[in-house]
Image (tube, coloured by chain):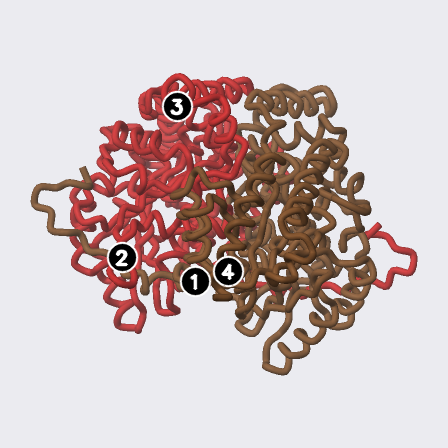
Chain colours: A red, B brown
Amino acid sequence: MADTTASATRPPALALEELHASLTDPVLDAMNFLNEVVARFPDALSFAPGRPFEGTFETEDLSRYLRAYTDHLEHGLGWSRDRVRTQLFQYGRTNGIIHELIARTLANDERIEVSPEAVVVTTGCQEAMLLTLRALFARPEDTLLVSSPCYVGVTGAARLLDIAIRPVPEGADGPDPDAVLAAVRHTRRSGGRPRALYLVPDFANPSGASMTVAARERLLEIAAQEDLLILEDDPYGFFVRTGSARPTLKSMDRERRVLHLGSFAKTALPGARVGYVVADQEVIGPGGRRSLLADELSKIKSMTTVNTSAISQAVIGGLLVESDCRLREANAGAVAYYRTNLDTLLGELERHFPAERRKALGVSWNEPDGGFFLVVDVPFRADHKALEDSARNYGVLWTPMGDFYLDGGGDHQLRLSCSALGPEDITEGVRRLARFVEARAARTSE
Amino acid sequence: MADTTASATRPPALALEELHASLTDPVLDAMNFLNEVVARFPDALSFAPGRPFEGTFETEDLSRYLRAYTDHLEHGLGWSRDRVRTQLFQYGRTNGIIHELIARTLANDERIEVSPEAVVVTTGCQEAMLLTLRALFARPEDTLLVSSPCYVGVTGAARLLDIAIRPVPEGADGPDPDAVLAAVRHTRRSGGRPRALYLVPDFANPSGASMTVAARERLLEIAAQEDLLILEDDPYGFFVRTGSARPTLKSMDRERRVLHLGSFAKTALPGARVGYVVADQEVIGPGGRRSLLADELSKIKSMTTVNTSAISQAVIGGLLVESDCRLREANAGAVAYYRTNLDTLLGELERHFPAERRKALGVSWNEPDGGFFLVVDVPFRADHKALEDSARNYGVLWTPMGDFYLDGGGDHQLRLSCSALGPEDITEGVRRLARFVEARAARTSE
């Protein structure tokens, strides 16, 4: 037994400071703290996690999706049973086996028309970020711009690869093209090379903000002018609360400046861990040899996970086949569900903090057009200590916004997610949150 | 449509030389060339791929395994149906959900006794390598020693992370402790810090060689003395041809010097993409806070793939439950199959190249005690050109050994894998190989 030898001198330990610097990134500690708080107060109502609603899923669906996919191969494409077996059992195509179904779905849902060869199927969108960053960032001066406040997944992946990051402050309408331009120029002046910008144009995590169509057009102009690539992440675009869905940057992209990152975690199921990146950029190698950026990403993927699980791809593939590659329509129920939730959240905030009251307190919030998240400004420090107080004494959890800023900021803001709670819990949760905010505000103004 | 705009100026292309250096690693080109040759000569008999035999798998098994796993949760552990549903649908524990089943299997099969908390479930063993390398290698001088010739997965992952690599020449009995000691000292003298050694102690890929038990003991002593970690990768250990299985380094590890990397790709199915790493080392952080290295790897994993597919884990979990966590016994059929294959391969080589003949030609090969691979020494350059000749004119494929060496070597060696062909194809394949070798040898000696 390795654990308990009789003569055991205590085995030597490793020093954390000798391990890679990403392990001491404060964001990781923040995330750990959040998970810990969630675990310590299991009875608290939680506006913290961005996890999707699972109410329409049944365990048995998995076998049905698998069958839908294998039926598609056998009867739709005329594959032999042996070939189907090999597809599910064996090592396979590095860039995935459901790239054609995904390309068709993107054409139907987003009017993104790309060759299936440009689609890299990944182990969740997180691997898509990792591959993309690894391929594009080669030199110490190569700098990743991120719309800030920013999703921690991309900054975390950048830390793993020791990539320099520059935050670009978001405006009320999300990522701001003029701020991007300023950041590009500032990066160049300080010796960096702005290589790509990461953003979530629709209902961003964490802010909930969305870009106008005009801002999207302007951003694409700036990308062309400044030779900047755009990493567009769009996990929430289906979930419109009010108005209509806006075109993705990729669907507007005439110069292949945009890499489009996608996820089935919110529109299908997170447990499958299937995401993708559309990388239709051309790459020129020695002797003028041309390849797709997707082919280059494939080389990286062969060194991260080799393949995305064929079983997971088959499950997602079956789900796409069942929906005739129209995932937006298949998500009509989920869209309605999240719309009700976000409407309920906004309505309850309004009810507990009517205009006069919120003015008196110094409380406000944004009203996202969709998605899972909104941000509340509060008149006290919404830090980890406040969160612990909220969980322990008021039975409600949320996420401190400060954790999403790279350069300070957000310390009087909290993020509320409405994806994982139903309307009744949201109503009760906002009641608790209101009590907490009132008490804290009173204590702060004392 | 992004692809075909009317006014289309040709979109700007990316220069390969501006992308990350790992993309121009010659090993990647070599792997691409191999895949290309395999694709161009689909009718050739191929001793190239190390893919496992899939004859005992049926597509329907997947649903049965899923049910075995959910039955285990519901009836074995008393979980509610809702909790089971959440387990399969939702984001979950970063380090995996079948860690307890894996820990039990390791205890049964390998006498590796570790807490389930020390097991990190990964998206194939490749991700286990990536996480481990990322955590342990922090500074430019941190050097990875690899037993050479070496599996390209680990050197590829190291390239992605810009980690310095030093090859340690393998002996006839595999990784050689004295050569490791010499490499450690040489690395230190040249300003590097030898951080860890990667090796495959049993039936290595590509050489087929295995370490004696005495060499394993000696290597553990050296690791303790030189403060070196050992990354033990053991995908083939079950597949003994002759003699009996030897203890893994991890089962002999009294000082937690060994990280044990594992894969279900060869013992279950590659398509699931489930692997793991046992990382029971202690880590000391600020203020003396102690954690397991597995916990630190979890932080990295949250930035690479977030979770290993719950569906894939459920499939492997079901397979473990069905086998009562005794995977070695469950693999009895596969063990016999690969034994027959390797025996057939050795027998046919002997038949076509009897002692006199091989002496005359300058041909020889090793006789591995198990696994998928053996190496043939030939009297001509076994390079990509020779491979192409072999495929086109003799209908047989193999892998040039030169691709597995980091510092030259292996240019008169070829690797034969016997895992993917049955005995009849092996017999015919060796007949073709013999014709090829005879012809090349004749041409070389002209």
Q: Along the horizontal axis of the image, is A410 left or right of A279?
A: right
Disc 2: host chain: A
Q: Residues within 10 Å of mark 2 (few under 14, many from 20)?
A: few
Type of the residue with mark 3: Ala
Say which amino acid is labelled 4.
Ala
The Cα atoms of the two marked residues, 4 and 1, are separated by 34 Å
Q: Quadrant of residue A7?
A: bottom right
- Is residue B339 visible to us here? yes
What residue would you read off at disc 3? A334
Q: Distance from label 2 to label 3 (Cα)?
A: 45 Å
**Residue marked by disc 1:** B25
Q: Which residue is mark 4?
A: B442
Q: Are marks 4 and 3 in contact (CB under 8 Å)?
A: no
Left or right placement of residue A344 versus residue A221 in this view: right
The residue positioned 62% from the left and 19% from the top of the image is: B81
Residue bearing the label numbered 2: A289
Q: In front of the other: label 3 or label 1? A: 1
Q: Which of label 4 and label 3 is nearer to you?
A: 4
